[in-house]
Amino acid sequence: MSRATSVTRDSPNAAAIAAGIKRRLGARSLVMVGLMGCGKSSVGRRLAQRLDLAFIDADDEIERSAQKTIPEIFADHGEAYFRDGERRVIRRILQNGPQVLATGGGAYINPETRAAIRSAGIAIWLKAELPILMRRVLKRDNRPLLKVDDPEAVMRGLIEARYPIYAEADLVVESRDVPHEVIVDEIIAILDGHPLLGGGQG
């Protein structure tokens, strides 16, 4: 798991590093992947601000396209219908880079979506342990997959099924109980030296 030396907002060369990452990114997107509750939207929004990029939440775009909330899509049409729409929306969004894109927890599991992200972006997996995820997801009542008697058992099953696939992401960063800016600092430090961006060329 990657945890590089932080490049904080207050570092003397922070602006130059951010500008260099944005320039070397070209038309590619930074795509946040991981289980619900790992912080994809919260961290992704702050990462976009630091890099002066647009931030897009795929779930918001799906709801806008369907003119329904995600729980309503699940209830009215089922998960398979939702996943097909999610795949199409993400493919469309990826054509508009550079940007930071936060995806839903199941998006990266689709092989076509993984291939599209690999072609047009850099995938960043925010990996979190089960207790942290449970504390976060139970604060909100908008998770269709968790509307069951034992949501922790569902989350445990999702971890077992999805973590080996999330591990295909280009970057892996530990999501934990620290300020979101700390995670952003670590992502920027990793990106600055990452081979996919030419490795620290500023």
Image (cartoon, helix red, strand yellow):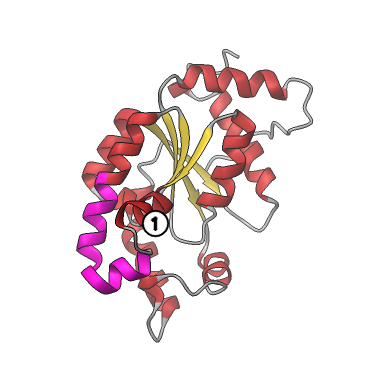
Residue 189 visible to the viewer: no
- Three-letter amino acid code of the residue under disc 1: Gly
Q: Main secondary structure of the magenta part?
A: helix
Towards the viewer: 91 or 115: 91
Could you tell whether 151 is left or right of 40 in the image? Answer: left
State the image coordinates of residue 158 (x, y, percent, origin top left): 36, 65
Check if residue 56 falls in the magenta segment.
no
Residue 54 visible to the viewer: yes
Q: Which residue is mark 1?
A: 105
State the image coordinates of residue 143 (x, y, percent, origin top left): 42, 70
- Quick check: 158 above or below 127? below
State the image coordinates of residue 7 (x, y, percent, origin top left): 69, 31
The region drawn magenta spans 70-88
State the image coordinates of residue 195 (x, y, percent, origin top left): 46, 22
What residue sits 30% from the left and 57% below the top? 66
Check if residue 80 falls in the magenta segment.
yes
Could you tell whether 90 is left or right of 2 in the image? Answer: left
- Quick check: 17 above or below 183? above
The quarter of the displayed image where residue 187 is located: top right
Towards the viewer: 15 or 118: 15
